[in-house]
Image (cartoon, rainbow, N blue to C red):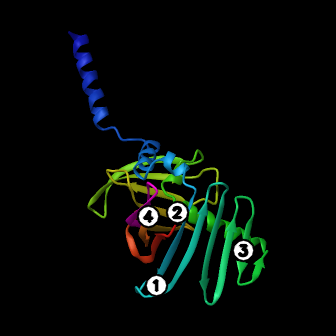
Amino acid sequence: MRWLCFLVITFCLTLSCVEGYSEKGPQIIEKSIKAHGGLDVYKKLDGLVLHKTTKLFLEDGSIESEVTQKQSFQFIPHYIVQIEWEANNVSHKLVYNGVEVYVKRNDSMITNPEALYRAQKTIKAAEYVFFQPFKLNDQWTNQDFIRTLKFNDTLEVSEVKISYPENEEADTWWYYFNSEYQNVANKVLHNEKYSLIENLKFQKYKGLLFNKHRKSYFADSLGNKKYLRAEYFYDIVE
């Protein structure tokens, strides 16, 4: 009878472990990519063009600046990204083909190495941010499930921490996924400051789900909002 009791106890312990089981980070990312259209569909995307409007706010709620960029992403037949905008009567154009980066202000080509480096980082950041969560399918990332929590005290989400141990300059991100595995928010540690970004509206394009409207708040390390810093609008035009 002792061996029977032992088996019953073991079985009960096994059940409790299953009930307390949480999905791993990579599993959540994989399901989120599927929820946003699927990796196979994303890999067939030849490119898209969008207008991104960025509004920056001061702590008192007044607008600091507003800029609209034209961002063009081409993946097929070859990779090339262009970002164009005008600010203070100066036109800017950044171009990156995966190898070289070009910067143009008005009619002048910029060759300063620091300016070229910043331009390349700007382009990579723009691509990374818009094509979430597809850009998380990267073998160089650590994808760690942290916990489940109530986002804004209402929505139950899974929190996954994304870090890049091989890249000392990379930001650290936390992604929040709802029960349908949509990426509804992010937290990022950038230059020793935390921002919390809410993904408020989405848009569909060629079977893929992308962000359309986002708000970014300065926050503390726990994600508690301090004040609205930025608002982003993405409108796919072709």
* Residue 56: image location, x then y, percent: 48, 81
Whichever of callouts 3 and 1 sits on the residue coming sooner in the sequence is 1
Q: Nearer the viewer, residue 100 or 42?
A: 42
Q: Which of pointers 4 and 1 lies earlier in the amino acid sequence? A: 1
Disc sitting over residue 103 in the figure = 3
Q: Report the residue at 44% width, 54% height from top.
A: 207
Earlier sequence position, callout 4 versus callout 2: 2
Magenta stretch, main secondary structure, is strand
Q: Is residue 214 magenta?
A: no
Point 61% across, 83% down: residue: 86
Q: Quadrant of residue 185?
A: bottom left
Question: Which comes sooner in the sequence, label 1 or label 2?
Answer: 1
Mark 4–mark 1 Cα distance, whole angstroms, equals 24 Å
Amino acid type indicated by mark 2: Val
Farthest left residue? Answer: 1
Residues at circles 4 and 1 in contact by the CB criterion of under 8 Å: no
User: Residue 129's mark?
Assistant: 2
Please say if 188 is above or below 158: below
Amino acid under disc 1: Leu
| Dot 1: element | loop
Q: Nearer the viewer, residue 85 or 65?
A: 85
The numbered mark at residue 58 is: 1
Q: Residue at point 47% right, 52% down? A: 161
- Point out which mark residue 211 bears: 4
CB under 8 Å between callouts 4 and 3? no
Secondary structure found at label 4: strand
Image location of residue 9, percent across then percent down: 24, 22
Instruction: Tell me where the magenta segment starts and ends, as one range.
Output: 197-210
Task: For marks 4 and 2, give the one nearer the viewer.
Answer: 4
